[in-house]
Amino acid sequence: MQNWDLQEDHLRYRGVFDWNKVYRGMVGWFGQQGYFFNEGLYKQKSPETEIEWAAKRKIDDYYLYEIKIRFQMWDLQDVEVVREGEKKVMQSGRMDITFKARVVTDYSGRWDTTPFKKWLEKVYTGTIIKRDIEFKHLAALYYTLYRLHEHTKELLGMETTGNAY
């Protein structure tokens, strides 16, 4: 099993946002894309809240895409906001969202049974299918992560939503 990591990305936000909308929207996005979603950590200790998510998607018997998201939020407070003539309870605070993604090869460990098979898989992924991993799988995962990043901006109501694609 080898991991091919993408560079992590950050999204920082300060202001008023609807946490329920962000939470449900992102979890729904994972479901629409065919990812198995797991919330590994939800730690709330005033004034900080930490949440860690992991989402996995099996591409075939050899490749697996994994996306990890970490939320760090500070100074969260409930505030009443009037939006479109209705009073809504939203949250105010600071947030840093870290997006990480990687392609995992041989996720089932079929090649990890003997030292020779481990070496053979290292040669196979390092030379024979390296370009396939880089141009087909890493590129696809990069654009998937980019779409998630843009979707998160839309859910937060940021002015920088949209992209060049």
Image (cartoon, grey):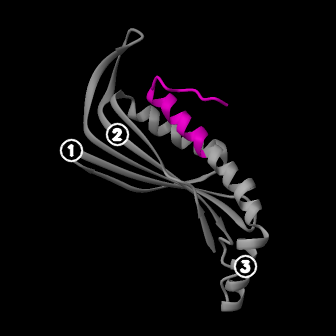
Q: Which residue position holds label 1?
A: 47
For the record, the magenta segment spans 145-165
Q: Amino acid at mark 1?
A: Pro
Q: Looking at the image, is mark 2 or mark 1 nearer the viewer?
A: 2
For the residues labelled 2 and 3, say whether their Cβ atoms are less than 8 Å apart.
no
Task: Indicate which disc residue 123 carries.
Answer: 3
Q: Amino acid at mark 2?
A: Met
Q: Quadrant of the N terminus?
A: bottom right
Residue 32 position, x and y percent, is 65, 42
Does the rendering let one see residue 58?
yes
Q: Quadrant of the C terminus?
A: top right
The disc, 2 or 3, on the residue closer to the chain's N-terminal end is 2
- How far is mark 2 from mark 1, CA to CA? 12 Å
- Which residue occupies 75% across, 67% down? 61
The disc, 3 or 1, on the residue closer to the chain's N-terminal end is 1
Q: Looking at the image, is mark 3 or mark 1 nearer the viewer?
A: 3
